[in-house]
Image (cartoon, helix red, strand yellow):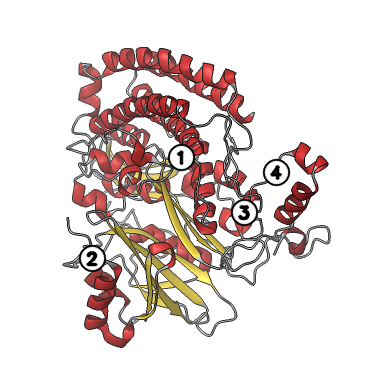
Amino acid sequence: MMNQPVYTDNDPQNELVTLNLGPTHPATHGVFQNVIQLDGERIVSGVSTIGYIHRAFEKIAEHRPFYQITPLTDRLNYCSSPINNMGWHMTVEKLLGIEMPKRVDYLRVIIMELARISDHIICNTIIAQDTGATTTFLYLFQFREHIYEIYEEICGARLTTNVGRIGGFERDFNEIAFAKINKFLKEFPVALREFESLLNRNRIFIDRTAKVAAVSAEQALDYGWTGPLLRSAGVDYDVRVSDPYSSYGDFDFEVPVGTSGDIYDRYLVRNEEMWQSVRLIEQALEKIKHEPAGIFHADVPEFYLPAKEEVYNNMEALIYHFKIVMGEIDAPKAEVYHSVEGGNGELGFYLINDGGRTPYRLHFRRPSFINYQMFAPMSKGMLLSDAIINMSSMNIIAGELDA
Amino acid sequence: MAEVTNQELIQQLTEKFGGKIIGITEPYGLLTFETTKDVIIDVLAFLKQNTLASFNFLTDITAVHYPEKKHGIAVVYHLHSMVNRIRIRVKVFIDEHHPEIPTATTLWNAANWMERETYDLFGVKFEGHPDLRRILNMDDLGVHPMLKQYPLEDPNRVDKKDEYFGR
């Protein structure tokens, strides 16, 4: 068949085993199919098949007004939805030329860094889980639950958050949210330190991860890697530093960089990023104290959906509400590319607006999709058990892979 | 690292490729230009090995469909120079009925799946691509769904029409 990849012609003695790893396999943590050819325990070749949860978001987005696209972005990398939501809001704000008040930027930094921590918790605990360390997985994973409780306090949702609006947030963070964030900042570093003490110098863990699936900086760049994967290979590229958005330029934080690009370095880079995220949240909370209280959106009534009680009691708000919902806002006819540092790398939004109610074209540059294409080529010659932790350490999220 | 301006890049590109570089704009500061498909790989290779700013990182390849234009499919490349912190966007308009363009996999391995996705969704045939198969949709789908002539909803349904949902 034309569409079948050739992978069996190198087996004249019929000694190799073809294994269907996936589409649903407990070791792959998502819907991924890899047809691999094994010589004993060693992988000879592999072919990745993706698209099992393709939902045609780019097509759907062409039929939706801007503010209805936010829920689609939730479902890209659903382990760190707020980053996607904010990335989308910022793309539209860039198109419309809206300047955010500093307090909104800092609130966004808080929720985006919480999302980054939750994303990295998933990845690092699952590396540990796949190397056999179940305790560490269960131990740190409860903090993802605490982060979800914070999301819940801010926007009412846990996984697919749909948080914020074009022009700011739908409501201010309440006292309970701040209390929960402060509690998290107190408890999480203790747990993360303990997590590190269980793994960082653990002989078994190092044997399983160090020098496994090492990638050079040249290879990583050639394959379009971004995010912690690229940084673990030694390239200090971080969108937060390179193209600062949401006032990241006001913050003092470091970009951890690895040297060898192996699984151990990826794990270390992600751990250090969690520490830096904690620092960023602490700084943001401190900075918010110096900003005028109660500001949670920009003053752009023609783009920002007004509060419901305003719509019912105030004619202007009703008019704006009607115009926004009916898509009668005048957005510039232009194209814009905006990217944010997602949990897995550069999450880009390429938006073309033709002045209509919906985008003419919206393309998501999804880091998981681009990172994952190296998986099959790099698995060649690897042990099957190493390939499994390699996949875990790439933190491929099926929603972002398929869009 | 010295700042590289868009003007310097335009000057360098027009010196090298002359009339093949057209439609230069700078929406939101991102240098955008169009070129033709016979020189696109040369342009990309020139940008990759550029002396001013080496655009050695391929951020994205995608396409846009403009059914009313003569050359109805725009293949869009986003390149990035991480060292100089500058991005560039290159567009090639190709014929909708013969959507063929040389592959960029000769320059970046990252282009492999990006081009497969573009082929899957728009039907753009990347000549010389090592493995040009559908990637997100099933093999026997038969159409390239992101083209504008295909509606979002099932056209046989009377309760769900595209105009109810915006466009």
Q: Are marks 4 and 3 in contact (CB under 8 Å)?
A: no
Q: Residues within 10 Å of mark 2 (few under 14, many from 20)?
A: many
Q: Is residue B133 above or below residue A130?
A: below
- Residue on which the image places disc 3: A66
Residue type for callout 2: Lys
User: Which residue is label 1 attached to?
Assistant: A397
Q: Amino acid at mark 4?
A: Pro
Judging from the image, mark 2 belongs to the subunit labelled: B
Q: What residue type is disc 1 on? A: Ile
Element marked by disc 3: helix
Q: Which residue is mark 4?
A: A306
Q: CA distance from mark 4 to mark 1?
A: 34 Å
Residue situated in front as seen by the camera: A220 or A364: A364
Q: Residue at x 64, y 28 (%)?
A: A156
Dot 4 or dot 1, earlier in sequence: 4
Q: Residue at x 42, y 51 (%)?
A: A339
Q: CA distance from mark 2 to mark 3?
A: 34 Å
Measuring from the top left, give residue B149's x and y in whole percent. Answer: 64, 72
In this rendering, does residue A39 appear at all?
Answer: yes
Residue A158 at x, y = what percent? 59, 28
